[in-house]
Image (cartoon, grey):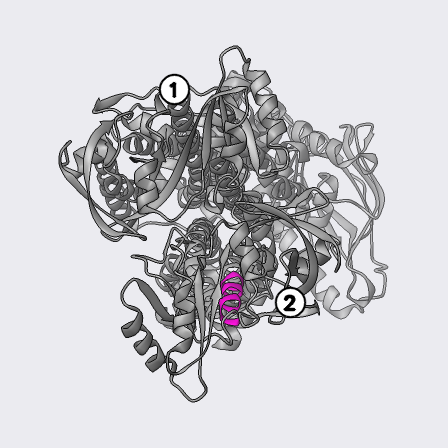
Amino acid sequence: MTNLLNDTPGTADTHAVAAPTKPVAVRARGLVKSYGTGPAAVQALDGADLDIHTGTFTAIMGPSGSGKSTLMHALAGLDVLDAGQVLIGDTDLTDLGERQRTLLRRDRFGFVFQSFNLLPALTAQENITLPLDLAGRRPDPEWMARLVDTLGLGQRLQHRPSELSGGQQQRVAVARALVTRPEIVFADEPTGNLDTRHGQALLRFLRDACDDLGQTIVMVTHDPLAAAHADRVVLLTDGRVIEEIADPTASAIADRMLQLDTEADDRPHTAASSTDTLQEG
Amino acid sequence: MLRLVLKQTMAHRGRLLLTFAAITLGVTFVVGTLVLTDTSRKVFDDQFRDASTEVDIVIRDAVAFDAAMGVEVERDPLDPQLAARTATLPGIDQAIPVVKGTGLLISDDKAIVPAGPSMLSSWTGVDGFTLREGHAPGGADQVVIDAATATAHDITLGDTVRVQADREADLRVVGLVGFGESDGLPDTTVALTSLRTAQRLLRLGDGISQIDVIAADGTATSSVAEDLRADLGADVDVAASQDTAAASAAAAKSQLGFITGALLALAGAALVIGAFLIANTFSVLVTQRTRELAVMRAAGATGRQVMTSILGEATVLGIAGAIAGTGTGLLAATGLRSLLDAAGATVPDGPTVLSARTLIVALAVGIGVTLIAAFGAARRAARISPVMAMREGALGTTGGRGRLRSGVGVAFTAAGVAALSVGGATESMPALGAGTAALVAGMVALAPMVAPAVVNLIGRGMIALTGRSVPAGLAREAARRAPRRTGATVMALALSLALVVFVSVVGASVRAALQSGFDEAITAELVVESARGEMLGGLEPTTLKKVEDLDEVGTVSPLRFGHWKDSGATRALTAFDPTTIDDVTDVDMVEGNLTDLRDGVVITERQAAERGLNVGDTLAMTFARTGTLKVPVVGLIDDDDARALSTDYLVSLASYRDWFTERVDATLLVRPSSGTSVHDAQVALEDALEGMPTVEVRDQASAAEARTASLDGILTMITAVLMLTVLIAMLGITNTLALSIIERTRELGLLRAVGMTRRQLRTMIRTESLLIAVAGLLVGTTIGVATSALFVRAIAQGGDLHLRVPTTGLALVAAVGLVVGVVGGLAPARRAARLEVLTAIRE
């Protein structure tokens, strides 16, 4: 899996800087979401704002319970918000009904989850083409071939998930996420169940997809090593975006995360963080 | 441990709901049957016990057997002098002459036709009937009837009712009687008159039916009976009235025995099909709880303890189902009674009897079936290793017994097919029965292999028809993925539908055989017969005379039926009039002919072959009136033609009069006189017989139809009951899908996340349900048609084959199967579609 998506060889270390001129793929404003009621209620999102630019690779990070998964689910139309706006192009996701959101996910988004990405009954190939099949469309054979080739799945297409290794399974999941040429790929801890070697390979592939194909990627992770592959890291605390790190390195992320964890421990839960610095781009 | 088991059961109560329903339904059926028949038995017991409270001994004409097919035989009248003589013997307080017979009550020109007998008897004052109003019948024009009939038909003291026996008379109601505590006898009308009047109505001259003896105070009944026997000789039967009551009750109850047997067999089918559902549920529960059970094991529970806990849950469930089933069974008894009633099999109603035996059976059945069904899953649970607590995924892999299972399945199936082939070729019923049982067992064992293959094929066909669709493809995959579960679900439906198909094909074929035999052999244009069941004894005594007197009637030929004993077994015979039989029938004789028959018996070719008899040999026949006679075989008749005359044994009316006391014509075969149209003759007959509501005049075609009326009623009832098993099978589909949805939550969540719409998800689940149902339909219809065809061949015994595969019946079965598929999937599909995507992914 060292060879990549097209003839232009990319390397894992070359991080393209997210140009501020790139158009916004997702614009999120004032996202609020709480779970449960009464004293047990959890404020998962508390006025989060975020822009995702086309062709960038964004990592969402934050301490446990900071709302990072909820944020991603909200952006991907998997969750319904209490308040706020999520604009995908001109479409406000929060206006859409259940069915429209489903179709949006099917046609314009791709998903990679931490585990259980594949249907055990389907072969690797059937799993890859699932969103297209659901839409009643045929895969573009060239695109399919290129994905399969790049991800090194050529020999595995007729295998069922139970016959694939963890790394292979995640690669199939990535192929599925890309097969529709989605506007955005959402990845939720995609390397969480992989060992370091396989995890790094997968991340390099996502990086290349972004660089070579201009694929917009949003990834939730708690791993600084993983986040270091992104163009920028968005840090969440208590349901708000408090900081962004452009061109992050693993050590910088790790330091900042450690800091945030310490602050979170010291800070009383009710106090709104005054240190919030919202940076754009 | 018990607390843990109870907790577990309660925790899974949602998932166990349908299983509980299946157990409850099965138990309901069993309890319903037992309550129904116990209640009816009790009615008979009470009736005959009450009837003899004061009478110690009953003297009747001696007979070789008391009853056949649930009907007490008629006895010859006794010499009236015998009563007077008996009264003078020592130790006798009273010897009361009694006349008993049948007399239809007619009030306001409307005949009162009870579901049971129309009883006509002389008044004794000691036989259990007690006056509620008025006085005992004295004069020749007086009658006492039972209070229940009087209330039901608005008859009061002073009214006139007509009593129709061999003669008929208008009598004034001078009293109303009850019977013990009740107002009458169940399903019976009672008319009590003076001895003379009863003798006149029944044309007995001064003959009497029996003598009711009351022993003098202080004498032992048994010794008095001994003395009487010694004194009166062997021509009369001296019996303690308790014994005669018991015998009467036993005769009445013997019919209940058939009904109990049939209903319990159907209940058994329901339980077997329910067992599939139970087995599936426990298998899924164990799979879902693999982790949890592994943790238990890791925490130190032994495999045996794990197994015990699962079986404990099954026991709790079985007990709950048994209790609920007992409750609903009490209600179901009423439903079954109406169902039987509609089918023409009336059973008497009384205060509901819930015996301890019923409760024990309910518990045993509920627990037993559940335990047996859950055993496989429990054993699998015991084999879960503690390591599985740590392992992600790969849950619920089944293995190990697969090879053994398929080996057993193949062996059974092969044995079944072999036995069926042999049975089919030799027309041997036992071989067919054993073959069917083996085939079913084999198919059940093979179900995990066969059913997914069938589902796959159907799925392919469906996809070919409707075009490629992901939901359909996924549904097919899902059904294939859990082969055991799918197999059990498919087989449950297949078996229940196979039963329906079987009943339908055998029924239609027997029907065709009966009708075609009648069409071919009976040439009479008109048939006069009783509108009531054959058991309740044919035509009114005056019918033949009235028909003979009509100018429009050219020939009338009566048929009578009788029972005889064939070294223990009860058989039926038909008596006919040799002088007229050729005018009204056209039968093929293999040897001899019917017109020459005087003494002797004509038997069917088949009976001759089976018994190794030929013309000139003798057949030992035991008649109640005469004892065993050596009757010469004088002719052989074609099997199918004999069937048109209802039995395999034909005798002349003259012989019948010698051998039977009964004088009831069952059927009159009538040809119009020359120059009279069939229609005119029918109108004339109907006019002449107008006052006899139990007599029907039918043309040849509708008489042929009527031949199968009781069969139709029974078939309809059986089919209705079998629908219950289909319902359980449908619950099985719903249950399997509901459980599999729980199991596949994450998978469904993933599908929804990557873009499957709710509608597509619903379609997927519904398709899965439909696939299972269609597979069950195919397998069930195949088994049903194949086995029933072989059975019909065996029934035909080399005679004309009347195999009928009723298209309407099969279409109905197919429709039912599809409905089951559609309806069975509704609830799970709705439930699946309601899953929140996020919750499902996160699970």
Mark 1 is on which residue type?
A: Asp
Task: Identify the chain of the residue marked 1, using the numbered disc in the image.
Answer: B
Work out whether B794 lies above or below A67.
above
**Residue B594, x across and y down, in percent:** 28, 26
Instruction: Give whichever of B87, A176 is nearer the camera.
Output: B87
Magenta stretch holds residue B44: yes
Residue appearing at x 60%, y 66% in the figure:
B351
Q: Secondary structure at mark 2?
A: loop
State which tag comes first along the sequence, 1 or 2.
2
Q: Main secondary structure of the magenta part?
A: helix
Q: Amino acid at mark 2?
A: Ala
Query: Which chain does the numbered disc 2 sit on?
Result: B
Q: Is residue B60 left or right of residue A43?
A: left
**Marking on residue B327:** none
Residue appearing at x 17%, y 33% in the figure: B609
The picture places residue B801, in percent across and down from the top left corner, at: 32, 24
Residue under pointer 1: B583
Instruction: Give the camera-side residue of B565 and B769.
Output: B565
Q: Which residues are magenta?
A: B38-50
- Give yes or no for contact between labels 1 and 2 (Cβ–Cβ under 8 Å): no
Kindly tell me whether residue B510 is visible in this rendering. Answer: yes
From the top left corner, tell me how far across and down residue B63 is, in percent: 32, 58
Task: Indicate whether B682 appears above or below B736.
Answer: above
The residue that disc 2 covers is B136
Query: In which quarter of the view is residue A94 placed?
Result: top right
Q: Residue at x 72, y 58 (%)?
A: B151
Q: Secondary structure at mark 1?
A: helix
Residue found farthest to the bottom: B218
